[in-house]
Amino acid sequence: MKYFIITGASKGLGAGIASALLSDDHHLFCISRGESQSLTEEAAAKKCTVDFFLFDLAVNHDIPGLVEKIFQKIDRDRATGIYLVNNAGVIKPVGRIEDTPADAVEMHMRVNLLAPMLLTAAFVKHTKDLATEKRILNISSGAAQHPYYGWSSYCTAKAGLEMFGRCMHEEQKDEPGPVKSMSVAPGIIDTEMQTTIRGTSERAFIHREKFVELKESGQLVSPSKAGKRIARLLLSSSFKDGDIIDLRDS
Ligand SMILES: NC(=O)c1ccc[n+]([C@@H]2O[C@H](COP(=O)([O-])OP(=O)(O)OC[C@H]3O[C@@H](n4cnc5c(N)ncnc54)[C@H](OP(=O)(O)O)[C@@H]3O)[C@@H](O)[C@H]2O)c1
């Protein structure tokens, strides 16, 4: 049995990744504030166990307890692989930093950066003595490498996430049963996050029009297509520990 912990699987890219992983020898643990009825129905049809944990990842101090609950459901003797996909994320706040309320910046960092760090920490603790395959995939963005006017929180959190993955690799690479991790920028996906981006004002995000054009010219990738590529990468032998890749380059 392979076990997958996926954040933000209620919609968008996370739902696409979760859907691509549905199989009768997989068990999915999905973490988000909302649930996906269609994913639950699809899972039942494919005889795959999916447990939804309704949880706000901004509440960082409850993350160790959440992971504890998930690992209570994992049969350690039957596990042939345990995987964590840090996918949940938000784009807001958007705008110049001096116009942004401090609590909005803090909330962003809690969800986009601190939550993946704390989930990873708990994952490493719980899998320490397990000799099975252990992998973490961080969903990053081109914004980790490229600064955007108005996206300072998003760019900073994603750059931090990529650096965190690199530090993880340094800590794990010489362990007998290392937790392997990599970061992937998924391209531009047709999700609610893109709707939010197109809905921001030109003043807050000066590149807004470019994102409108990408949508209108049909250049956004569907969550299902991107989800399939990410699920394949997660399970494949080309999952390269410590690597950072952009799906648009491959
Ligand atoms: N869309 C793109 O073009 C694009 C490009 C590059 C990278 N990405 C990255 O891809 C990932 C997924 O984005 P998306 O486009 O699929 O966005 P989305 O459609 O807005 O979905 C975001 C997911 O994150 C969850 N989430 C947000 N805040 C949360 C919180 N406080 N606690 C728990 N879950 C929370 C949401 O679940 P609930 O609302 O149910 O809590 C939802 O399932 C993000 O990391 C994003 O940065 C997206």
Image (cartoon, rainbow, N blue to C red):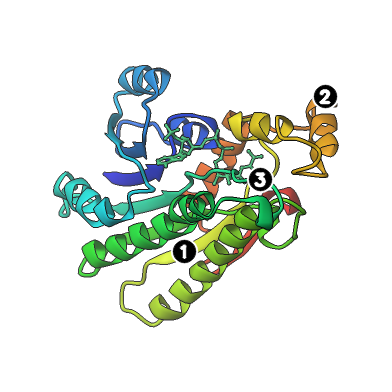
- Give the quarter of the image for residue 119: bottom left
Q: Is residue 63 left or right of residue 210?
A: left
**Which badge, 2 or 3, is on the more N-terminal residue?**
3
Please tell me which residue lies in front, 83 or 97.
97
**Which badge, 1 or 2, is on the more N-terminal residue?**
1
Which type of secondary structure does the marked residue at label 1 adopt? strand
Which residue is the site of mark 3? 94
Please, what is the three-letter code of the amino acid marked with disc 3?
Val
Using a 10 Å C-alpha cutoff, classify the residue at mark 3 as few (fewer than 14 neighbours), some (14 to 19) or many (20 or more).
Answer: many
Which residue is the site of mark 1? 181
Please, what is the three-letter code of the amino acid marked with disc 2?
Glu
Which residue is the site of mark 2? 216
Furthest residue in direction bottom, as rendered: 174
Closest to the camera, between mark 2 and mark 3, is 3
- Compared to residue 224, the image places residue 186 above or below, namely below
Closest to the camera, between mark 3 and mark 1, is 3
Which type of secondary structure does the marked residue at label 2 adopt? helix
Residue behind label 1 places its C-beta within 8 angstroms of ligand 1: no
Q: Is residue 123 left or right of residue 203?
A: left
Please tell me which residue lies in front, 100 or 240.
100
- Compared to residue 186, the image places residue 228 above or below, namely above
Closest to the camera, between mark 1 and mark 2, is 2
* Residue at the (27%, 56%) spot, across then down: 61
Q: What's the distance in space between the residues labelled 1 and 2, CA to CA?
A: 35 Å
Q: What's the distance in space between the residues labelled 3 and 1, CA to CA?
A: 29 Å
Please, what is the three-letter code of the amino acid marked with disc 1?
Ser
Residue behind label 3 places its C-beta within 8 angstroms of ligand 1: no
